[in-house]
Image (spheres, rainbow, N blue to C red):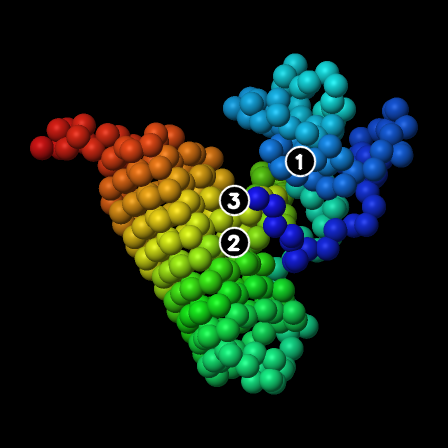
Amino acid sequence: MKYLNLFFKKRKKTYFYDILKNLNIENKKNYKNILINDIQNLDQAGKNDITFFHSSKYKDLLKATKSNIIISTSQLSYLLPKSKLKLIVDNVLISVAKITEYFYPNSLKDQFENESISIDKKKIYKNVKFGSNVILGENVKIGKNSTIGHNSIIESNVRIGNNCNIGSNVIIKKSLIGNNVSILDGAIIGKKGFGFFPNKNKNIRYPHIGMVIIGNNVEVGCNNTIDRGSLSNTIIGSNCFLDNQVHIAHNVKIGKNCIITGQVGFAGSSTIGNNVMIGGQAGISGHLKIGNNVKIGGGSGVIKNIPDNTKVMGYPAKDIKKFIMENK
């Protein structure tokens, strides 16, 4: 499902020639008049978007992509469809970072908003209760019967549904929050993710233009940090309960009806199925797929995909019966 991104302004017009110039690539074929709409992941890109292919494990997505322009490397070029326009570079992800920043010039900035406004909250938000020292950005929408605790900051364009309870000292930015959601004290929702690429003497930060989307009937515990997505969104499905001090990195997708206990950490771009239960201090590596109805024991380290209806524990996480036999 695609959501309208309310938080980042894109350049009005970008041509393929502009992208070549941005990457310091010589324009040998006069591509000046090819208009590019946006930069997107393989599975989200439309025919007028530019996308990227940096690992052979995404070859199924490559076959299905609608994009006509693909960034890749010479080592992977043999997998690219002949019908597509190819942009061959030395480092795909660094090139994507530069192009994303070109499309969205303010995407690397994440400082406090100077345009946060002082308003008569009682007039605009008639059915919302506010604690002391609450700061709201422009165009924030908050549903009826919601409460916002002391010293919390809700930045511009954030959407909060009906019957929500936002605790004290909470920061929410670049996020869409559903109905009946509780976000407890100290949580930070929607900050940019931790994305860097080593590049000789200077690390390059990856822009984050995605959002955090939280479904209905969710509880987010104290001091949780949920990073927004890079190109795609970070998503928490409906009816999930997150204990205190959980960290969810960029692009993570958590299904419905999941229970995640304290100090669990998710690395970026992993997908978690429905009805998953994860014990305290477990760690989930990046770019993994955890199936439906999975149970992960506390302290486990998950470094590979887990199929549906599986119970695992240990480091590396393995079938729980095998773990118990090995640790009698």
Q: Determine if residue 186 is in view.
A: no
Between disc 3 and disc 2, the foreground one is: 2
Marks 1 and 2 sit apart, C-alpha to C-alpha, by 20 Å
User: On the rendered image, what quadrant is the N terminus found in?
Assistant: top right
> SS of the residue at dot 3?
loop
Viewer-closest of 126 and 12: 126
Q: Residue placed at 35% from the left, 55% from the top?
A: 242
Residue 110 in the image: above or below residue 117: above
Marks 3 and 2 sit apart, C-alpha to C-alpha, by 10 Å
Q: Residue placed at 27% from the left, 50% from the top?
A: 280
Judge the density around disc 1: few (<14), some (14-19), many (≥20) Cα neighbours within 10 Å. many
**How far from the left and from the top, in percent, is residue 216?**
44, 57
Q: Are marks 3 and 1 in contact (CB under 8 Å)?
A: no
Residue under pointer 3: 251
**How far from the left and from the top, in percent, is residue 78?**
65, 14
Q: Is 158 left or right of 257, judged from the image as shown?
A: right
Q: Is 202 left or right of 105, judged from the image as shown?
A: left
Q: Amino acid at mark 2?
A: Ile
Residue under pointer 2: 213
Q: Amino acid at mark 3?
A: Asn
Residue 256 in the image: above or below residue 71: below
Q: Quadrant of residue 271?
A: top left
**How far from the left and from the top, in percent, is residue 323?**
19, 31
Viewer-closest of 36 and 237: 237
Residue under pointer 1: 45
Number of callouts: 3
Marks 3 and 1 sit apart, C-alpha to C-alpha, by 16 Å
**How far from the left and from the top, in percent, is residue 146?**
47, 73
Q: Sequence-wise, which precedes: disc 1 or disc 2? A: 1
Residue 220 in the image: above or below residue 229: below
Judge the density around disc 2: few (<14), some (14-19), many (≥20) Cα neighbours within 10 Å. many
